[in-house]
Image: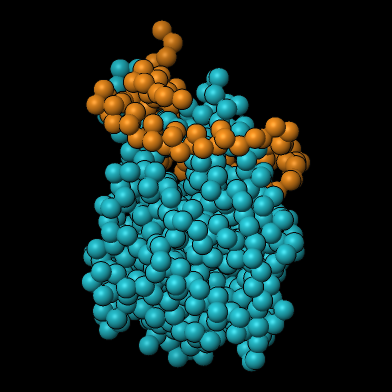
């Protein structure tokens, strides 16, 4: 599966990472090498093999729906780039 | 010499008040002050916090309320959140991030009375095998400053090897404890997936990430693991099982043939093309030593091992692309200075905050998970992951532990593999399958090869165990360390500093 520059820009947009044209070319070269490595998988017959998502065959634990943590909004927001009145500030999204 | 003392010896000296924790901590901090400007193992030091912990440890010892690690200065990989400490994961994205809470591993060591000496350098978000992707610069291998310490836990590795700490922590997603342990010549253990809580450990690939000890000897690792392991409800994949004492078997590992009856499996794939001759020679000599200790050798095969690298470079980036989507410049982390709208704020913040390798892996992960490619890549990789895990199930029917090299070569020169990601990825040829299967693996010092300039470069022997068989692996490592002294050796030039 060969990638082109447009693919790189599409993927970068999906990942929300800005890439310049120069970076896109460099990224294309490196990613093509990595995808070449990944292509080795296609030679393996995996018909009927159940995918393994995890090394332990366990199910998700559930807990009682009760409050276990105290509110630490001020502490957590002290490391935020921009806050006001306990809210995180971002550029306007609704006109 | 104190800097070469085992954790047990240091514990005894502290308990008998021959030395205080403050004195011990200051001695290590002094070594760090002298050597860290060159080696770059630590990226954050906070002497005030460190000494406060040492004083508290001394008070506990005076009050008779202490354990084996009380008062012992440990280096913490900068992937673990430690309350009030800058925690960066070696990324510009988190350059100013002050952790608001403690990782489980950190709170376990705090409860044990250990002293946090500082946060160690690493590959950015643990993505790398040479520590060269760190935003804070590379780390020198203490055995040869022209060479890399391995990665991603390169700072912890150099700190242990240069004796800048009594022991350290690391994390291992594809070999990040065992490969640096091999390249820097110390003992490092990646436990079974689920044994050590991932709470507060900055996520890379969550189905593979596992924290473990990095120390001089198997005995030291056992003492560390006693503190690190254990159920934690805050990690949804933490395994709820009874606590073990990982030192329980060590005392039996002496005398004639302490390993009589132990079956060691040697996978033929670990001794094939890709393994350098000087490493192969050291590993063969170590295996011969194990025969003398009473072990028997069984030839085994892990036929799908070569597929572990392609599978890993689908699954780990896929998980990373999801995990790292949290860095958006909104709640914490880097935010770009200039942007016109929200979308641009995300895109610029992430473009500026992440380094090249991290971006590559996010893009690979995004691609393999994108519409139309999921079955061909992600699902396919998960299917082959099962084949790789089944290889081990089959192998462990015929042996108790598996041995081989931990890395295909000795430490390579800085810059040698940075331009070719695929060459760098092949560093983890013998370690990645263990993560995919979720098994425990360790690397112990097994000897040296010479580099071109006549400097000795360490070689690590990898020991892979069955699920939750860490105690046996540590016994096996300890037995070897009773009859060899590779694990006590340190770079001569750093001995008298």
Q: Position of residue B252 (x, y in %)?
A: 67, 85
Number of numbered tags placed on the structure image: 0
- Taking the spot 46% from the left edge, 68% from the top edge, the residue there is B280
Q: Look at the picture and state if B17 lies above or below B71.
A: below
* Model colouring: by chain
The reply to whether residue B117 is visible in this rendering is: no
Q: Look at the picture and state if A82 lies above or below B190.
A: above
Q: Look at the picture and state if B32 lies above or below B45.
A: below
Quadrant of residue B75 within the rendered picture: bottom left
Chain A rendered in what hue? orange
Name the foreground residue: B436 vs B303: B303
The reply to whether residue A8 is visible in this rendering is: yes
Q: Position of residue B106 (x, y in %)?
A: 52, 60
- Taking the spot 30% from the left edge, 17% from the top edge, the residue there is B340
Name the foreground residue: A27 vs B257: B257
Q: Position of residue B351 (x, y in %)?
A: 33, 31
Q: Position of residue B117 (x, y in %)?
A: 40, 67
Quadrant of residue A41 within the rendered picture: top right
- Taking the spot 61% from the left edge, 73% from the top edge, the residue there is B474
Quadrant holding the C terminus of chain B: bottom left
Quadrant holding the N terminus of chain B: bottom left
Chain ID for cyan: B
- Taking the spot 65% from the left edge, 78% from the top edge, the residue there is B295
Judge from the rendering whether residue B217 lies leftward or rightward of residue A34; answer left or right: right
């Amino acid at each position: 599966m060969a990638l082109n520059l447009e693919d790189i820009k599409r993927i970068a947009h999906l990942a929300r990472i800005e890439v310049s044209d120069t970076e896109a070319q460099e990224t294309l070269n490196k990613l093509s090498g990595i995808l070449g490595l990944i292509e080795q998988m296609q030679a393996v017959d995996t018909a009927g093999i159940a995918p393994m998502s995890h090394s332990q065959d366990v199910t998700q634990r559930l807990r009682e729906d009760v409050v276990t943590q105290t509110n630490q909004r001020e502490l957590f927001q002290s490391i935020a780039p921009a806050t006001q009145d306990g809210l995180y500030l971002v550029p306007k999204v609704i006109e | 010499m104190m800097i070469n003392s085992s954790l047990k010896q240091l514990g005894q000296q502290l308990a008998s008040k021959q030395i205080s924790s403050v004195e011990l901590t200051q001695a290590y901090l002094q070594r760090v002050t002298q050597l860290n400007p060159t080696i770059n193992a630590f990226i954050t030091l906070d002497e005030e916090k460190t000494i406060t912990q040492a004083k508290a440890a001394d008070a506990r010892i005076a009050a008779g309320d202490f354990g084996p690690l009380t008062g012992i200065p440990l280096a913490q990989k900068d992937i673990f959140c430690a309350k009030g400490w800058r925690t960066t994961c070696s990324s510009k994205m988190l350059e100013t991030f002050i952790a608001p809470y403690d990782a489980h591993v950190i709170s376990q060591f705090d409860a044990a009375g250990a002293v946090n000496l500082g946060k160690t350098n690493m590959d950015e978000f643990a993505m790398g095998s040479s520590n060269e992707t760190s935003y804070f610069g590379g780390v020198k291998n203490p055995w040869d400053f022209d060479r890399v310490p391995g990665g991603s836990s390169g700072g912890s590795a150099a700190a242990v090897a240069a004796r800048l700490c009594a022991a350290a922590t690391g994390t291992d997603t594809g070999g990040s404890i065992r490969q640096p342990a091999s390249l820097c010549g110390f003992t490092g253990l990646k436990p079974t997936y689920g044994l050590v809580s991932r709470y507060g450990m900055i996520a890379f690939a969550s189905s593979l990430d596992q924290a473990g000890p990095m120390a001089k000897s198997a005995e030291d690792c056992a003492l560390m693991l006693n503190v690190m392991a254990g159920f934690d409800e805050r990690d949804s994949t933490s395994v709820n099982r009874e606590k073990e004492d990982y030192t329980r078997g060590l005392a039996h590992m002496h005398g004639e043939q302490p390993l009589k009856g132990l079956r060691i499996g040697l996978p033929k794939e670990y001794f094939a093309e890709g393994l350098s001759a000087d490493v192969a020679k050291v590993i063969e000599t170590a295996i011969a030593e194990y025969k003398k200790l009473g072990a028997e050798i069984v030839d085994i095969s892990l036929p799908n091992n070569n597929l572990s690298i392609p599978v890993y470079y689908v699954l780990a980036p896929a998980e990373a692309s999801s995990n790292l989507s949290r860095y958006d410049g909104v709640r914490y982390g880097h935010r770009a200075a200039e942007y016109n709208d929200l979308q641009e704020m995300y895109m610029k913040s992430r473009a500026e905050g992440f380094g090249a390798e991290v971006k590559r892996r996010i893009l690979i992960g995004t691609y393999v998970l994108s519409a139309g490619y999921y079955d061909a890549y992600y699902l396919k990789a998960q299917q082959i992951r099962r084949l790789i895990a089944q290889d081990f199930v089959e192998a462990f029917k015929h042996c108790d532990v598996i041995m081989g090299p931990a890395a295909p070569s000795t430490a390579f020169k800085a810059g040698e593999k940075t331009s070719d990601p695929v060459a760098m990825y092949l560093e983890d040829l013998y370690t990645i399958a263990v993560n995919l299967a979720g098994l425990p693996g360790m690397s112990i010092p097994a000897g040296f090869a010479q580099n071109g300039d006549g400097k000795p470069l360490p070689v690590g022997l990898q020991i892979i165990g069955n699920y939750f068989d860490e105690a046996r692996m540590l016994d096996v490592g300890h037995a070897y360390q009773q009859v060899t002294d590779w694990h006590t050796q340190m770079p001569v030039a750093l001995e008298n500093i």
